[in-house]
C-alpha cells in the first residue's frame, strides 16, 4: 500500500502594496466557485490570464464595498491591471478604478497532486480565519477586492486579503 503524501500546513504571509489601478470584473450571483462558474462560465480565467499587463493571476472573491450593488453578494471574478489599461472588454465584463491599497498575501506551499487543490485551499482558509490581524496592527478592509487565486500544485494556494493599519 502506497503512503499518501500529505499537503503541508505551512502558510506564509506577506504585505503587498498596490498602487492605484483598475479592476476588470465579472459579477456573479454566488459565493460558491462552482455555482458561479455554472452561472457565468469559466472562460473568465483564460481571458484574465491572457492579459500580459495583469498584476497577478485571475481571481474570484468579493468586490470592494464601493462596487457592490445593493441586494447582491458582491461576488465576482476579476483581475487587477495598471491604471492606464484601455483595451476593449468582452460583453458582460466591467472595469473600475481602485485606490491604492494594502494586501496581506497568504500563500500555501506547493503540493504534488493537482487533485488536492481543495485541501490546499481549505488549509489556507483556516490560516486566514485564525490569523491575528489586530495583534499585528491590521484590520480587514472593504476598500480592495478579496482575491482568492485558487490553488495550483506548482505554486500552492493563494489569497490576498485587503487590510488597513489600525
Image (tube, rainbow, N blue to C red):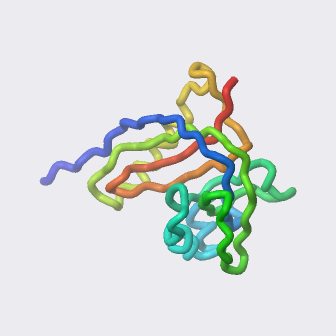
**Residue at screen point 47% across, 48% down:** 158
- Relative to the observer, which residue lies in front, 44 or 6? 44
**Residue at screen point 55% across, 52% down:** 148
Q: Quadrant of residue 94?
A: bottom right
Tell me, yes or no, if residue 42 can be seen here.
no
Q: Farthest residue in the right direction?
A: 70
- Relative to the observer, which residue lies in front, 135 or 82? 82
In the image: residue 53, left or right of residue 111: right
The image shows residue 133, relative to residue 73, as above or below, that is: above
The image shows residue 44, relative to residue 67, as above or below, that is: below
Q: Farthest residue in the front direction?
A: 84
Measured as percent of width and height from the top left, residue 156 is found at 38, 50
In the image: residue 118, left or right of residue 41: left
The image shows residue 27, relative to residue 88, as above or below, that is: above
**Residue at screen point 68% across, 32% down:** 164
Measured as percent of width and height from the top left, residue 100 is found at 68, 44
Quadrant of the drawing holding the C terminus: top right
Q: Quadrant of residue 7?
A: top left
**Residue at screen point 59% across, 51% down:** 147
Tell me, yes or no, if residue 140 can be seen here.
yes
Measured as percent of width and height from the top left, residue 129 is found at 56, 35
Measured as percent of width and height from the top left, residue 125 is found at 51, 42
Q: Farthest residue in the left direction?
A: 1
- Count of numbered badges drawn on the protein: 0
Amino acid at each position: 500500500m502506497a503512503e499518501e503524501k500529505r499537503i503541508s500546513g505551512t502558510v506564509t504571509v506577506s504585505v503587498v502594496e498596490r498602487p492605484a489601478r483598475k479592476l476588470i470584473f465579472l459579477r456573479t450571483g454566488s459565493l460558491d466557485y462552482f455555482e458561479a462558474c455554472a452561472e457565468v462560465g469559466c472562460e473568465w480565467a483564460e481571458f484574465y490570464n491572457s492579459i500580459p499587463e495583469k498584476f497577478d493571476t485571475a481571481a474570484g472573491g468579493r468586490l470592494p464595498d464601493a462596487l457592490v450593488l445593493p441586494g447582491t453578494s458582491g461576488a465576482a471574478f476579476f483581475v487587477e491591471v495598471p491604471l492606464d489599461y484601455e483595451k476593449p472588454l468582452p460583453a458582460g465584463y466591467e472595469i473600475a478604478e481602485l485606490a491604492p491599497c494594502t494586501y496581506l498575501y497568504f500563500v500555501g506551499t506547493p503540493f504534488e497532486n493537482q487533485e488536492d487543490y481543495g485541501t490546499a485551499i481549505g488549509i489556507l482558509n483556516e490560516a486566514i480565519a485564525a490569523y491575528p490581524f489586530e495583534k499585528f496592527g491590521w484590520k480587514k478592509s472593504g476598500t480592495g477586492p478579496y482575491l482568492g487565486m485558487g490553488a495550483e500544485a506548482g505554486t500552492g494556494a493563494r489569497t490576498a486579503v485587503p487590510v488597513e493599519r489600525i
